[in-house]
Amino acid sequence: MNLDEVSARLTEVVGERHVLTRVSELLVYSSDGLPGYRKQPTLAVFPGTRDETIAVVRILAEAKLPFVPRGAGTGLSGGALADGVVLLGLHRLKNIISIDVENRRAKVEPGVVNLKLNRTVAPKGLMYAPDPSSEAACTIGGNIAENAGGPHCLKNGVTLNHILALTVILPSGEIVELGAEEGERDGYDLRGAFIGSEGCFGIALDITVRLIPRPQVIRTMLCDFTTVDAAARVTSAIVASGVIPAALEFLDGPMIRVVESSIYAAGYPKDAEAVLLVELDGLQEGVDADLETVRRLALDGGARNVKVARDEVERLRLWQGRKKAFGAMGRLSPHLVVQDAVIPRSRLAEILGRIEGIRQKYGVIVCNVFHAGDGNLHPNIPYNADDPEESERVHLAMKEIMQACVSVGGSITGEHGVGLDKMGYMDLIFDPVSLAAMCDLRDAFDPERRANPAKVIPTHRCREWMAAPSARASAKAVQA
Amino acid sequence: MDGSAIGARVGEGGAGVSTETVVASVRDAAGANERLRISGAGGWMTAGRPVQALRAVSLAPDKGIVDYVPDDLTITVRAGTSLADIFAATRVNNQWLPLDPPGASMSTIGATIATASSGPLAHGAGYARDFILGVELVTGKGDVVRSGGRVVKNVAGFDLMRLMCGSWGTLAVITEATLRLYAMPRVDRTFALRAPGGANGIEKLAAELRAAPLAALSMELVNATLARKVGLDADNFILVRLGGNENVVGVQMKTLAGMGEIVETDGVIWDKLSEAVSQPATFSLRLSGLPTAIGGLWSAAEQLAGNDGQTHSTFSRGIVRVTSNVVPDAAAIPRPTASQRVTYEVLPAQLWQSISPSVVGSRLSENVHDAYDPHRLLNPGILG
Ligand SMILES: Cc1cc2nc3c(=O)[nH]c(=O)nc-3n(C[C@H](O)[C@H](O)[C@H](O)COP(=O)(O)OP(=O)(O)OC[C@H]3O[C@@H](n4cnc5c(N)ncnc54)[C@H](O)[C@@H]3O)c2cc1C
């Protein structure tokens, strides 16, 4: 089957409007949330139902064509970029199939937007815990693929901890049930293996998520500091104290000032060098006591001020600055590197100090806004990608920051995934045998290596890579 | 033949087990075309389908803490380290790994992960799959593989850690694991709430507990046989473990008292329970389903338990487990249905094939199996 024939077959399934082949139409889908990368798909197809999705995958299987699943395209590692292959968009699959209040679970299609699910279950006193800052746009399917986190994952866990079952269509067209909607599933935890597989193992057709009761009370506080070091030490002290805040977020001075001079101004003190946004939730009596513990740790640790939001309006305003921090950076410069690394939580002060040194060495701007309670850093560098000299400095600074995080036992990504962007760093934390073993897992799900080819594991690390024809083609495309 | 190795002769126990020796054992076995039986402390070798292996490797001697940074609330241990040792090492810093499978005191962490075992704490804290941050493995090909890391959040690379949970040693030998720890609750109190007998009564009470403003560490329903063994009257009880600060435990205790007759018990009741439910049994299985279906699952399990069998349930998770020394007639052993799953733990050897031939028979599972243990060297047949 040539591409025209495939296109005709796909059109029969999904209708003319939902198959794009013209370069001008495909432009929208040539980037995702990761700035600085553009990759052009050969064709984009957008099934509107589960059956259409199955038919589409089977046509691609028959034609032996590689494809890239895509949700909302908010991913920050380039995972949803299709480089000379088919892009398979799932955002039209947005039915919430069922909600079981008593058993606290919901079954959804992959294109359901994270916040939409939460708004739907909130009146029933329930919530879906993982809340990426992109919650207003990103899809549950994308969350599964990236094992997404979010500010409130400190207490409640990440996507992995909230998925009960999945129906997956493998790239071969075979449909498999992973996990169990009810009760325990014996055998290999293939649901666990699928979550975080970045679109390389197949497509999630429906997803059964765990819902948890909304907390009785929520209290949010802002602690402000005149040094980054003090805020970092207080973060470590809170973690070590055993209090588990629902969220523990960190914004440094440059980030605070960017937020405060944007339309998202949240009332953070502009002269602070760091603020900690701490949220506690649960039963009233527990929250009150924990609030006092955190207040004392913050003040003892040098906080200039600790402010507790008095009402919901004030609380949401404090959060707005955090949730819109990336958006606020848009006005600084045309491009932005959003980095994602993890360090042991006890090393926060040390690493932030090293990042400051790297910033000075390369003369770049670094804005830090991150999930401090998990040690999940997001050092962001705004810059102008059209300036090759500046781009080079930014690149070198990022690499050195990454190396610093890895050198203290950290990881190269805590929630954004490896995708295209982080492949070059995989060798920093995994040896060749481990990388090959990961390729083997992908091969178990997708022996032809057609789903999201040439992502996550550097191709030269996959055993017998040259044996898979579709992968060979896409590897060439990446090198070109 | 039960689940233990027959005529095991190579690498049995003894000191000096390490990643390198495990690699050598796997490679030697492959060279000789002989199978390997993997064990931890050896406390539950009767579980699973019969395994025929001429060689054995025990991970129990490979124990000890590799790295423990209290301020990070993470710990890295060798696979043979017992949960009791982890508990002792972390308690000095008021931290713990909230994982209490049957026989927790002697169980090794490697076996706990491999068998995906959990206990009453699963109610509030979850399962091994929720705590595991990193692993080192030796695959059936003799490769040493690492997945995950030592930090609490990490999405780099495909997830081989979760794959190990419940793999029963058939893909790889776990040699090391990094786990997430939690602060121990400052106040930790346990109450026994008398529970009704019948399915309806249990279902109703479970629903009330679900709806109540409680954030318990554990809520475990035990039958009369077990209640007696842990020092209570011979009646059904729900053991509720509350943790946190003084106030939060106090207010929950009041809520609980409003729901029925409660008595406070010593916290050692959990150790007694863990001990009782890990006693050798000739028959044990778990029934599971939706939490709202708990009444039916409980009645079915109680019927299997008969007069002397032990039944206990983490009902919020929809799981009921029964252990007994009387094996029911083959016809009476429950099979999976649309609303009820069955996890067989211990069955007479001759029954396995007819009752549960395999739980890894799907093409996808076969592919995964082929990827890591293509020659079926490790615990062959234990999952079917
Ligand atoms: C402003 C901003 C803030 C963010 N904050 C966070 C945060 O706090 N935490 C966090 O974890 N992430 C965050 N992200 C990253 C991103 O939003 C998440 O990774 C999200 O899960 C991606 O969802 P998506 O629907 O946009 O997926 P896409 O970007 O479309 O795709 C991401 C990956 O998922 C695959 N995929 C998509 N759908 C499916 C499916 N149905 N089946 C199989 N594979 C599929 C794709 O192939 C791709 O590899 C943020 C992004 C932005 C832009």
Image: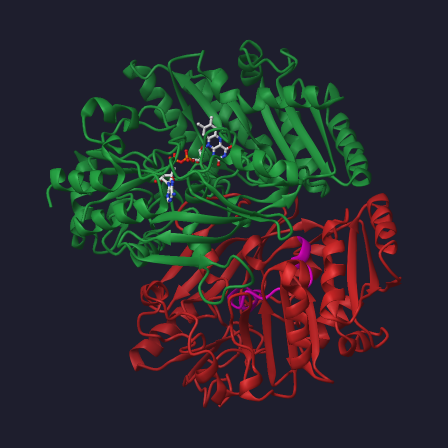
Chain colours: A green, B red
Q: Is residue B121 magenta?
A: yes
Residue drawn at 76 percent across, 25 percent down = A299
Q: Quadrant of ligand 1?
A: top left
A412 sits left or right of A60 in the view:
right
Task: Determine the residue located farthest toward the left in the rendered image.
Answer: A2
A129 sits left or right of B312 in the view:
left
* Magenta residues, start to end: B109-124
Is residue B241 positioned above or below B245 on the image? below
Q: Is residue A217 magenta?
A: no
B110 sits left or right of A26 in the view:
right
Q: Position of residue B121 (x, y in %)?
A: 68, 59
Q: Quadrant of residue A300?
A: top right
Task: Determine the residue located farthest toward the top in the rendered image.
Answer: A261
Q: Position of residue A1 (x, y in %)?
A: 11, 46
Asked whether A143 or B125 is in front, the reply is A143
Q: Residue B93: in sight, yes or no?
A: no
Residue drawn at 44 percent across, 29 percent down = A339
Is residue B152 positioned above or below B78 on the image? above
Q: Position of residue A254 (x, y in %)?
A: 54, 16
